[in-house]
Amino acid sequence: MELSVLTEAAFARLAGLAFHARQAGEADAFLIALDQDADYDNPNFRWMRSRFERFVYVDRVVVAARARGRGLARILYEDLFAAARSAGQTRITCEVNSDPPNPASDAFHARLGFAEVGAATLPGGAKTVRYLSRTIAL
């Protein structure tokens, strides 16, 4: 999966803004998600904020190559869904690259019930993303 590069300080700041952050194993996988109130200056997050009053935005989900195929991303997402329900959140959002394409992430999010709600070309035109959303029952 494709992620933007962060310095160690920027990663620490992002983790500090998290609504929900979890890891699986010592360094096998992790997920960082923010809610609509996060002070996060990111074009994808701003896109979500301009369209949804309340949401949880998955900024990063990473699974180490050696740990793929063990269901860790699904476990992390299920944990996020439970945390969101507990907080009264009903919408989970994220984005997936469409150019360059990311078919593995597309298939994964489709299996979890995410649907496209928009698309954008990011500043600088380096990549295009599809915005995805899934509602969850409280």
Image (cartoon, helix red, strand yellow):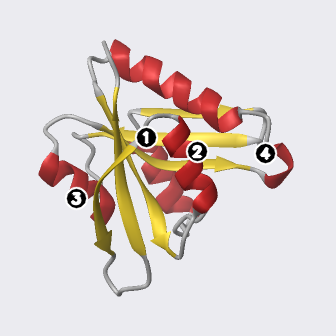
**Secondary element at image label 3:** helix
Eyeballing the image, is 87 above or below 93?
A: above
Residue 108 disc label:
2
- Of badges 1 and 2, the one in the foreground is 2
Which quarter of the rendering shows the N terminus? bottom right
> Residue at coordinates 48% horizontally, 66% vertically from top-left?
97
Tell me where residue 31 appears, x and y as whole percent: 56, 41
What's the CA distance linking mark 1 and mark 3?
15 Å
Earlier in the chain: of badge 2 and badge 3, it is 3
Horizontal arrangement in the rendering, residue 2 relative to residue 116 (left or right): right
Closer to us: 39 or 138: 138
Q: Position of residue 75 (x, y in %)?
A: 63, 27
In front of the other: 96 or 61: 96
> Where residue 33 is drawn, which disc sits there?
1
Q: What residue lies at 24% left-to-right and 51% top-to-bottom?
A: 48
Measure the C-alpha gap from mark 1 to mark 2: 17 Å
Q: Which residue is mark 3?
A: 47
Judge whether 116 appears above or below 111 on screen: below
Nearer the observer, disc 4 or disc 2? Answer: 2
Callout 4: SS: loop
Kind of residue indicated by mark 3: Trp
